[in-house]
Image: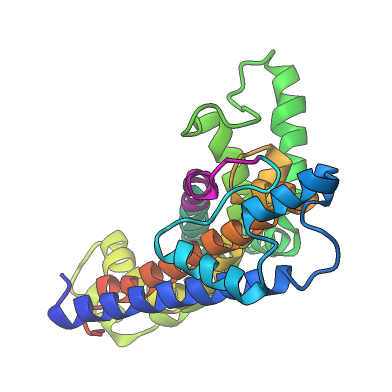
């Protein structure tokens, strides 16, 4: 499927992602060290204890020395230790929480594409019918509501009202059991995270499908006697996907960054929750690590979206 040119393109993009991650983490590192206050303020250390802790983390050295040590650690995959929990390395924490955020984000992306494209295709096929009006109105409502409002409403409905009505048999779970979340812990936050973006996909898919189904090759396919489902999926939807894929890049970034709010609402131990906690605890090393994780996720997600062009349209080559 991937030609030699595509593989070279992937390699180049991976190099750029590494450089971007280094650039983002460096900017955050320098910015944090320019903030007023003391990184060890929350530790309530005094005298020799305070100086020993500064020396342990290398905070008593000149800034350029700290920066060089930081870059050397980054190259070796070492993001340092937590300032709050002394001796706890940051890299395993970030990798573990990045996997949790990626799990939520992937399911949210499935909701975004699945619901959005389904709504858009059905609304286009049933144009100017009651079904079109209902789906279009639902899309507008979903696009207009922030994800934290949708999350709160879903918890109220599925976590309280329906749970009381079904006497606790409804499958919904707050928190994150084990390393990998259960279905009950994943589907509701993923839906809250993905539905606003699904509304955008639905509106764009509808507009694109309406343009495609009026093309000559669609009429030719009907004249050949092909079934309507085959015409819509094989000839219509595939050609209508190009504009949808174009906006998937920004939508993926929105899903990744939107997880900060959703993870805190649902108590999910991902990058978003750790990011909020590290800021409140003034654990600056973890803040840098979380930003680094976000930069890596955004870069890899954008690369994956760009490679979809090759899969959907064989005429596109890198």
- The residue under the point 47% across, 57% down is 118
Q: Position of residue 188 (x, y in %)?
A: 61, 39
Q: Is residue 127 visible?
A: no
Between 148 and 112, the residue placed more toward the observer is: 148
In the image: residue 316, left or right of residue 281: left
In the image: residue 262, left or right of residue 107: right
User: How many numbered circles are shown?
Assistant: 0
Between 16 and 145, the residue placed more toward the observer is: 16
Main secondary structure found in the magenta portion: helix
Question: In the rendered image, which quarter contains the N terminus?
Answer: bottom left
Q: How is the image coloured?
A: rainbow
Q: Position of residue 58 (x, y in %)?
A: 63, 59
In the image: residue 26, left or right of residue 208: right
Q: Which residues are magenta?
A: 86-106
Q: Is residue 83 visible?
A: yes
Q: Dividing the picture into quarters, in which one does residue 61 lie? A: bottom right
- The residue under the point 61% across, 27% down is 172
Between 288 and 3, the residue placed more toward the observer is: 288
Q: Residue furthest top?
A: 167
Q: Residue furthest front?
A: 48
Q: Is residue 126 above or below residue 22?
A: above
Q: Position of residue 80 (x, y in %)?
A: 55, 54
Magenta segment includes 179:
no
Between 53 and 2, the residue placed more toward the observer is: 53
Magenta segment includes 97:
yes
Question: In the rendered image, which quarter contains the C terminus?
Answer: bottom left
- The residue under the point 66% across, 73% down is 63
- The residue under the point 49% across, 50% down is 91
């Amino acid at each position: 499927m991937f030609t030699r040119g595509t593989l070279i393109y992937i390699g180049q993009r991976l190099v750029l992602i590494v450089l971007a991650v280094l650039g983002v983490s460096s900017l955050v590192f320098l910015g944090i060290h320019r903030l007023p206050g003391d990184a060890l303020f929350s530790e309530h250390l005094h005298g020799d204890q305070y100086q020993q802790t500064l020396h342990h983390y290398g905070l008593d050295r000149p800034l350029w020395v700290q920066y060089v040590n930081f870059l050397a650690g980054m190259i070796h995959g070492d993001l340092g230790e937590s300032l709050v929990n002394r001796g706890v390395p940051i890299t395993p924490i970030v990798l573990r929480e990045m996997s949790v955020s990626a799990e939520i984000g992937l399911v949210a992306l499935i909701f975004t594409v699945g619901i959005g494209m389904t709504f858009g295709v059905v609304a286009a096929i049933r144009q100017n019918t009651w079904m079109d009006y209902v789906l279009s109105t639902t899309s507008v409502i979903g696009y207009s509501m922030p994800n934290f409002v949708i999350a709160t409403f879903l918890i109220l409905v599925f976590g309280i009202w329906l749970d009381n009505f079904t006497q606790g048999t409804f499958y919904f779970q707050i928190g994150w059991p084990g390393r990998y979340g259960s279905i009950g812990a994943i589907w509701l936050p993923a839906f809250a995270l993905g539905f606003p973006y699904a509304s955008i996909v639905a509106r764009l898919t509808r507009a694109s499908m309406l343009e495609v189904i009026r093309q000559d090759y669609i009429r030719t396919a009907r004249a050949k006697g092909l079934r309507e489902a085959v015409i819509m999926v094989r000839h219509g939807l595939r050609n209508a996907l190009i504009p949808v894929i174009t906006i998937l890049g920004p939508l993926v970034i929105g899903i990744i960054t939107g997880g900060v709010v959703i993870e805190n609402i649902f108590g999910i131990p991902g990058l978003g929750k750790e990011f909020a906690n590290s800021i409140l605890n003034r654990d600056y090393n973890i803040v840098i690590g979380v930003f680094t994780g976000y930069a890596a996720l955004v870069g890899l997600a954008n690369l994956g979206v760009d490679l979809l062009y090759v899969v959907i349209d064989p005429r596109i080559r890198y």
